[in-house]
Image (spheres, rainbow, N blue to C red):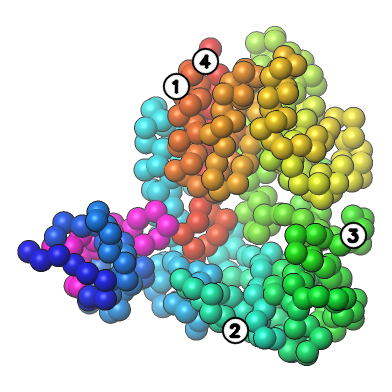
Amino acid sequence: MSDISAGQDLDLDILDLAAGGRGLGRAEDGRVVFVAGALAGERVRAHLTRVKRDYAEATALEVLRPSPQRVEPACPLYGRCGGCDLMHLDYPAQVEAKAAWVRRALWRLDPLPEAKVLASPLAWGFRNRLRLQVQEGRVGFFARGGHQLVEVSACPVAAPAANALLPGLAAALQRPEWSGLSWVEVLAHESQAFLTLGWQGGGDAPSLAGLAQEVGAQGARLCRGEELAGWPLNPEGGLVYHQDAGLTLRAYPGVFCQVNFAANRLLLDEVTGSALGLQAHLASRGEEAPAELEALDLYAGSGNLGLPLAAGGWRVLAVEGDQEACRAAVVQAHQAGLQERYMVQAAEVGQALAGLGRAGRGFDLVVLDPPRGGAKELMPGILELQPSRVMYVSCHPAALARDAAVLVNAGYRPSGLTVLDFFPHTGHVEAVLVLDAPA
């Protein structure tokens, strides 16, 4: 039995599909090998790219025995472009694999409820927001594992309205006056599209309105370094991504929103449905009138989760550190007539939570949708508020498991789990874990 080394080629049996989408094999020296482009049950010839003491990383060079779930990737750039990494796996099998990753990450949260698994309503053309890189007038995505540009003229996962802009955008940005541009983000839905332009050059940028008109967008917004230019947060300045029972939510260029509007609708249904169930439960116990129930929305963004709760009768305190997102949330609350039920606190989430604890505040429901790294440092503060229910939305199952364990150790019980696929053909997955206070 010999040691393995980077640069070596190995024939490996793939035992499983690991979280993130890489095949998992084992070398003769016992080390686990994570193989990009390989599927469970396959035998592949793999090229070792990195070797560590306990594991190695590799790329599949040749599939010697394919999985029956292997399919021909729909994109001719697949394997070069770094945007997708599971396009070689049949889509229903992708969803099953992602549900397995979530269950595997959360298995210590005993008893873990049976997961409700929801595929993306659109497996193709689902991406309503995408960021493209710009290098020397060329437009595309970074290559897999590096910063070389792969030019893109059409993307099968992009929404049709976004794809419609790409040829004109690529042609326009070749002109010398746009040489200071490093990236462009496209926000598109149905017949509307907006651009956000990352300007790294000195001096003034060329005409944004002229570029938008040329490529067929409704408008373009400049981002110079980290500073966004002003933007009208009115109906004409954004596009509708959710409309239900009198509530209209808009996405604006430069303001964070979920990339998959159709899957986001499923997320909103899960959150509002769970909140409605909690309302009914507390009302049946006679503890509170449903109209008096209070929710705390942490990492609230521009109101994606909190505004539907307010429309459903909750009094919501939304905490968000991004000033532009806060401004969009306030505007949308006023447009919906919810300003008396939806309060926005522009603050760093940890500091705001500590202040609520010192003030002796309590909430019936806490909803949080933190960044990928999770929010372990917030768990003690959430416990101090003694909510009846916590709904944790996560794009990183391992971080969710780590954070939720703090609540479970304090007596909270996992009562609901939903796995949502926001990102078909990638190794990313979204999960919603509901935890109820001890009786």
On whether residue 140 falls in the magenta region, the answer is no
Instruction: Name the element at disc 1.
Output: helix
Instruction: Name the element at disc 3.
Output: loop
Q: Which residue is mark 3?
A: 230
Of the pair 127 and 246, the residue shown nearer to us: 127
Q: Are marks 3 and 2 in contact (CB under 8 Å)?
A: no
Residue extending farthest to the left is 1
Q: Categorize mark 2 by other alpha carbons within 10 Å: few (<14), some (14-19), many (20+).
A: some
User: Of the residues tagged 1 and 4, which is closer to the observer?
Assistant: 1
- Give the amino acid type for the residue marked by disc 4 in the picture: Pro
On whether residue 18 falls in the magenta region, the answer is yes
Q: Position of residue 434 (x, y in %)?
A: 55, 31
Q: First in sequence: mark 1 or mark 4?
A: 1
Q: What is the C-alpha distance between the residues marked 1 and 4?
A: 11 Å
Residue range in magenta is: 10-28
- Give the amino acid type for the residue marked by disc 2 in the picture: Glu
Q: What is the C-alpha distance between the residues marked 2 and 4?
A: 54 Å
The image's mark for residue 438 is 4
